[in-house]
Every structure is written in C-alpha cells, then in structure tokens.
C-alpha cells in the first residue's frame, strides 16, 4: 500500500516547509517539498532531504532509559513515569516547585509544545528560562523601537529596488528565500550582502561588504551620517520618529571616515548603502538572526531600525526592516503565564552558571525537552557541571544527545514525521498543521502523550485532557476563528495567516507608547580586543546540520576555517589547537583566502562528547539587551599542537 501524506516541517527554521511524504507499508520511503506551497516551491533543504536516515537511524531511542550505578538501563514506560512523578512530587514537597527547572528549546517549533510549559506551570509553577539564546537581542531591539516585531509580507520583496541582506546566510539558513530573492532580482531589485564572513550568499548579490565582526554599529552610524549630510532623509521624519536630534548627534559624534575605519569598511561602501536607502528607495533591510548574537547586538539592530526609519523606508511597499515574522501571532497561547507566573527564571545563555549559583532552593530537578543545552548553550563545561550536580535530570529526546548522556532518565519521543501540531514560521506568514505521517515506533511517545501520562500521576489529569486536535482547535479559536479559519481549513492545506497586513506600519503608526519610532540615542559600550586572542570565533549554521542534529556524519575533528595568513603556519588540512579563555579544542585547520584575517569559522552544533563543540570555547555572556547569547564575540587563538 502506497500513500501520500502532507505535513509541515517543525524544525527551528524560518521556512516551515510543507512536506509531501510517501508511505509504503507503514514506512516513509520518500519526502519532498510541496509544489503547491508558495514558499516551499517543491524543494526541501539539504539537511531535511536526508531526514529518513535520521528517522530510521539505529541510534534512535525506542525505550525509556534509567541510569543505575552510572549506566543506562532500559525500563518500561509505566516504571519511568511513576518514578518521574514520584521524584518531582518529592522535590516539590521538600523544597518547593522552584527547585524544579523546566527547560524547553527549539527542537520543534510546534505550538503544542507549549503544553509542556502549561503542565509545569500547573504542577508548580516551576523555574523556567528567560531571555532567548537565538534572537533575544534582536527581538528586544525591534520591540523597543517599534513596539511590535513582525515583517512585511514576504512577497512584498518583489516591490523593492534594493534588498540589503544584513548578516544573513540564505543558502544555509533560509533556502526558501532564495527563489523569492531571484524573482525580485528579475524584477529589477539589486541585492547587497553585509557580512564579515564570505559565504555563498555573496554570489547572489551585486555587492558584498565585509566589515569586522560587530563593526555594523559603526557602519550604520557612517551611513546615518551620510544620509544626514546628503539630505537623504524622509521629509516627515519628525512626525513619526522620537529623538531625531539625539540620533543625529549620535551619528555626528565621529566623522564618516572614522566610523568607517572602525567598521573596517571603505567610505564608498557606506555611501553606496546610504544612496540605496535614501535615494533609490524602496530599500528593504533583511536583518539576519546572527546579527543580534553579539555583545552590542541589540544596539546594532536598533541602529538598522533607525536607518530604515530616517530614510523613509518603513511602512512602504518594498521597504521595511525585517528581523522576524510573528509565528505565534495567530495562535492563542495566553493560557500559559510564562515568566510572569514563574517563581524564578534562569537566563538561557547563562544556563550553566545560573543553575550552579541558585540557592534557596537549589535546582534539584531539571526537565529538558526539545533542547540540547550541553551542545548548544555557551560554556558547555559549566553546563555539564550544573547537570552533574543536579539530583534528577530528565531529558525528552529521540537520541542520546550530549545532554541526554547526562540524564538520570531519558524519555524517547517523536520526530518531525510523527508530529501532530500547529505551525507558524519566522520567515514568512504561512501557517499549517503537522500531522503524523507515520505513527511513532513502539516504545516512543509524543511530548503531549508523555505530559498527559505524567499529569495523570500527579493529580492534573483533568487540565491536560483533550487530544492534539482538540488542543489545536482551542489554540486557533480566538484569533483565527473571527477570520473564519478553523482546524478543518488548515487541514486542507497551509494558508497565509489572515491577520498581519501586507505592509507593516503602513500608516506609520507604531506600537510604542508615543506611537512613533523610538530612535536609538546612545552608542553601545566597546570592548578592547585582547591581543593574545586575535580571532573572533564565528560558530555558524551549517547546511549539514540543524543545530546539533547532523544529517551527515561529522568529520573526525571539528573543522576550523581561517585566512591562510591567520593559520599560524599550520598547513591546510592539518590539526591545530583552538584556545579560548575557558577551554581548547583540537581542530582540523582549513584555509580560505576569502575570509577576514580576524575570524575563525566553525560549525555550530558540534558534539561535546566528540570534542567538536564550539560552545566549549565560549563564555556564557549575554547581549546588551534582551538577554540573548553573545555567541559570536568570543576571541580565540590558533596554535600548533
Ligand atoms: N542549515 C541550517 N539551517 C538553520 C539552522 C541550522 O543550524 N542549520 N539553524 C536555524 C536557526 S536556530 C536559526 S535562528 C536560523 C537563523 O540562523 P542563523 O545562522 O542565525 O542565520 P543567518 O542569520 O542567516 O546567518 C547568520 C549570519 O550572520 C552573520 N554575522 C554574524 N556576526 C555578524 C556581524 O557582526 N555582522 C554581520 N553583518 N553579520 C554577522 C554570519 O556570518 C552569518 O552569515 O536558521 C535556522 N536554519
Ligand atoms: N556556538 C553557537 N551556539 C549556538 C548557536 C550558534 O550559532 N553558535 N545558535 C543558537 C541558536 S540560533 C539556537 S536556536 C539554539 C538551538 O539549540 P537547541 O534547540 O538546543 O538545538 P538542537 O541541537 O536542535 O536541539 C534540539 C533537540 O530537540 C530534539 N527534538 C527534535 N524534535 C523534538 C520533539 O518533537 N520533541 C522533543 N522533546 N525533542 C525534539 C532533537 O533531537 C535535538 O536533540 O542554539 C544556539 N547555540
Ligand atoms: S528545516 Fe527548514 S528548509 Fe528544511 S525542510 Fe524544514 S522548514 Fe524547510
Ligand atoms: Mo535559532
């Protein structure tokens, strides 16, 4: 028997593709992109095209594992959940619910994953995370400036004369933007990439600017200075921006040449961007998520918001400063109180250090779902220590990840082809339902199933009752219901979320207290680069992996790519040692003359137990605003072994 089933990819990716799966005799034999989905356009990314090898990997967990005398032993689900319920209730009784930490990350972006938060809130409320390792600084920047964070309709890019990809690697992280960018080019748009790293997207663009990492604030100030000098400022700017004079003074603190020197960019490049923004409108700025992941990341995104504002590119077709699409917007998740309800919070980028520091009560239990903090959060060794010291660590995952290896109890869960959920996207406005393409293998339960069975053991059966479809209905009713969109509508196929307008802030009314754009007034603090660590460690997305989930087996050693002049004499292909202030890794050095001499590139998501994890080298540090992770500001040195 052969059948075709559609679902939505739930990975932490802006694209939220519609997947068409072929199922033969209960086994998925093929997956491809849906031709009918206007964003997916019939193709999937490299990593998910290869997902069947993950789905059917021999390493996939199909039974709960309990640690006894140091080793994992398979146990039955009833035993596992009885034990979990017992331990959690004991800890709650003895130390209060704050002694339990529920940590959920982006393994799946399905909105029903929020039900795990809901359960723990009702069981506690317990300690939860605050801030956001991925986009904390950028989110906060846009909220502070505009009072709202969303984007123009993605197809509005077809109206742009210029598109500035500011720190954005579309080939790796949002491949479904590429056809739209190509269409925009065929309609006359001109593309620019601004990125310290020479990456594939440069080939798509007519111009490529390669500033020093984090030099973007200075570059933005140079551009602002040129906009003011040349009078390329929107006439009515005073009617929709606050602090215009302060912003003008900020840009005027240094000469354009000085700002450009600091950014390590020629003045002509700054002038080129200023012209596009101020004279050759409309110009859309697409800000990459990586842009915020540095010490001054919030200030950088705020500076880009300001450029869009003063040049008059906000609220017009073909313009906008886009960082994020409000993927949860159409869904009503207000039944979870979150940080406002929690007795305390742990800053996500400071996971390890804060867990170790907390007393009264200490964190005695941690429940980790859809996340791999050992591999993905900075300062891995501290994270390992924090989990080692915690008396009861539960990890819900499909694989024995770096984090699951440290658990007391591992609970096997479903994959993206077994997911039953609702999805929005952070790279466009389409929404859809994920449906199990195949049922999970025997011995595997969905996150919802696990939580429901746990709830039944701790007296919360009633609140978690209802199957996935009923939860979907409840979550859709409030905002989508009035637009006539029901679960049945979405089950026919993905639709564009009917709520957001095509043009954001069309009337130049913003959602700040004053209704105007809040222009940045202050420059961020600067750090003096330490001479003994000359390289910025940029551990970036690779097309071969979804964070720590690799689609192809990694090499024996983590690869570190540098300009040949920065290789410290280590030949291409040979091993070297990459040292930071907190740790060191053996890496295979690769030369690339297109890179700057002050960066070293690694893939994010390398496994800690294989000695390949960039996060072992990073100190846990937050961004200037929004409690994001300053992931790309760690300085390292390469030395011979
Ligand atoms: N294949 C693959 N795709 C992914 C992921 C993955 O792991 N693998 N991860 C997913 C996740 S979690 C997310 S959040 C998204 C986004 O994932 P991200 O990796 O954040 O994607 P981008 O924002 O496209 O890429 C970041 C770009 O910002 C640049 N950058 C870094 N610092 C600076 C700087 O100081 N200045 C400038 N101008 N640029 C800078 C980097 O060089 C890089 O090219 O993608 C998702 N897509
Ligand atoms: N050095 C460095 N560190 C980074 C980044 C970087 O660029 N550089 N990027 C950061 C970013 S942008 C992000 S978003 C984070 C990502 O950090 P994480 O969200 O921790 O990333 P993953 O490694 O994908 O871990 C997700 C886990 O969820 C599991 N999983 C998948 N589906 C499900 C499911 O349905 N249920 C459950 N329970 N589990 C599931 C997967 O098997 C996987 O082990 O990492 C951040 N860390
Ligand atoms: S990971 Fe992203 S690009 Fe790849 S299939 Fe899923 S949604 Fe599409
Ligand atoms: Mo992310």
Image: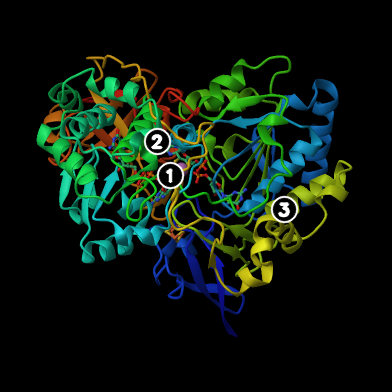
Q: Quadrant of residue 180?
A: bottom left
Q: Quadrant of the C terminus?
A: top left
Going by the picture, which residue comes out furthest to the bottom? 1
How many other residues sit within 10 Å of disc 2, few (<14), some (14-19) or many (≥20)? few
Q: Is mark 1 within 8 Å of ligand 1?
A: no
Nearer-the-camera pick, 305 or 410: 305
Residue at image mark 2: 239
Which of pointers 2 and 1 lies earlier in the amino acid sequence?
2
Q: How many marks?
A: 3
Q: Position of residue 498 (x, y in %)?
A: 56, 62
Q: Which residue: 23% across, 65% down? A: 187
Q: Secondary structure at mark 1?
A: loop
Q: Which residue: 81% across, 39% down? A: 85
Asked whether disc 2 touches disc 1, contact meaning CB atoms under 8 Å apart, the reply is: yes
Which of pointers 3 and 1 lies earlier in the amino acid sequence?
3
Q: Secondary structure at mark 3?
A: helix
Image vertical order of residue 554 relative to residue 34, above or below:
above
Q: Quadrant of residue 445?
A: bottom right
Residue at image mark 3: 448
Disc 2 to disc 1, C-alpha distance:
9 Å
Q: Position of residue 124 (x, y in %)?
A: 79, 32
Residue at image mark 1: 508
How many other residues sit within 10 Å of disc 1, few (<14), some (14-19) or many (≥20)? some
Q: Does residue 88 appear left or right of residue 283 in this picture?
A: right
């Amino acid at each position: 028997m052969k059948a075709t089933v559609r679902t939505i990819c739930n990975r932490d990716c802006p694209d939220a593709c519609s997947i068409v799966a072929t199922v033969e005799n209960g086994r998925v034999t093929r997956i491809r992109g849906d031709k009918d989905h206007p964003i997916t356009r019939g193709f999937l990314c490299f990593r998910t095209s290869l997902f069947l090898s993950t789905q059917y990997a021999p390493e996939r967990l199909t039974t709960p594992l309990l640690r006894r005398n140091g080793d994992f032993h398979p146990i039955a689900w009833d035993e596992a959940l009885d034990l979990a319920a017992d331990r959690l209730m004991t800890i709650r009784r003895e130390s209060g619910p704050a002694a339990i930490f529920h940590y959920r990350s982006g393994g799946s972006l399905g909105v029903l994953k929020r039900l795990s938060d809901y359960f723990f809130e009702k069981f506690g409320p317990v300690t939860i995370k605050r801030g956001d390792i991925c986009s904390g600084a950028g989110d906060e920047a846009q909220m502070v400036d505009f009072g709202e964070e969303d984007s123009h309709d993605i197809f509005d890019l077809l109206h742009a004369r210029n598109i500035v990809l500011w720190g954005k690697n579309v080939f790796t992280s949002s491949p479904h933007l590429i056809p739209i960018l190509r269409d925009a080019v065929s309609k006359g748009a001109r593309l620019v990439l601004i990125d310290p790293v020479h990456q594939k997207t440069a080939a798509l663009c007519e111009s490529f600017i390669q500033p020093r990492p984090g030099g973007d604030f200075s570059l933005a100030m140079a551009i602002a200075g040129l906009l003011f000098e040349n009078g390329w400022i929107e006439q009515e700017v005073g009617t929709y921006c606050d602090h215009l004079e302060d912003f003008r003074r900020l840009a005027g603190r240094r000469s354009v040449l000085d700002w450009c020197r600091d950014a390590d960019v020629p003045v002509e490049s700054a002038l080129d961007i200023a012209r596009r923004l101020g004279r050759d409108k409309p110009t859309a700025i697409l800000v990459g998520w990586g842009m915020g992941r540095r010490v001054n990341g919030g200030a950088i995104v705020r500076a880009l918001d300001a450029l869009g504002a003063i040049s008059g590119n906000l609220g017009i077709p073909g313009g906008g400063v886009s960082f994020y699409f409000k993927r949860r917007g159409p869904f009503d998740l207000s039944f979870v109180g979150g940080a406002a309800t929690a007795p305390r919070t742990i800053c996500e980028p400071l996971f390890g250090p804060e867990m170790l520091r907390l007393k009264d009560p200490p964190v005695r239990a941690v429940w980790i779902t859809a996340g791999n903090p050992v591999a993905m959060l900075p300062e891995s060794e501290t994270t390992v220590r924090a989990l080692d010291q915690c008396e009861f660590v539960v990890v819900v995952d499909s694989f024995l990840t770096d984090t699951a290896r440290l658990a007391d109890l591992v609970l096997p869960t479903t994959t993206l082809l077994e997911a039953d959920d609702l999805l929005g996207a952070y790279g466009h406005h389409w929404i859809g339902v994920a449906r199990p393409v195949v049922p999970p293998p025997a011995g595997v339960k969905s996150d919802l199933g696990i939580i429901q069975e746990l709830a039944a053991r701790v007296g919360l059966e009633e609140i978690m009752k209802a199957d996935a479809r009923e939860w979907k209905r409840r979550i859709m009713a409030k905002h989508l219901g009035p637009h006539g969109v029901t679960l049945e509508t979405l089950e026919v196929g993905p639709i564009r979320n009917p709520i957001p307008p095509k043009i954001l802030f069309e009337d130049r009314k913003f959602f700040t207290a004053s209704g105007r754009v809040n222009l940045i007034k202050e420059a961020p603090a600067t750090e003096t680069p330490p001479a003994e660590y000359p390289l910025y460690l940029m551990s970036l997305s690779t097309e071969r992996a979804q964070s720590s989930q690799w689609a192809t087996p990694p090499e024996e050693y983590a690869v570190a790519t540098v300009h040949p002049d920065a290789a410290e004499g280590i030949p291409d292909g040979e091993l070297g040692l990459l040292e930071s202030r907190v740790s060191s890794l053996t890496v295979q050095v690769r030369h690339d003359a297109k890179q700057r001499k002050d960066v070293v590139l690694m893939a994010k998501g390398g496994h800690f137990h294989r000695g390949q994890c960039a996060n072992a080298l990073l100190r846990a540090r937050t961004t200037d605003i929004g409690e994001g992770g300053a992931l790309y500001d760690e300085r390292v040195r390469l030395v011979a072994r």
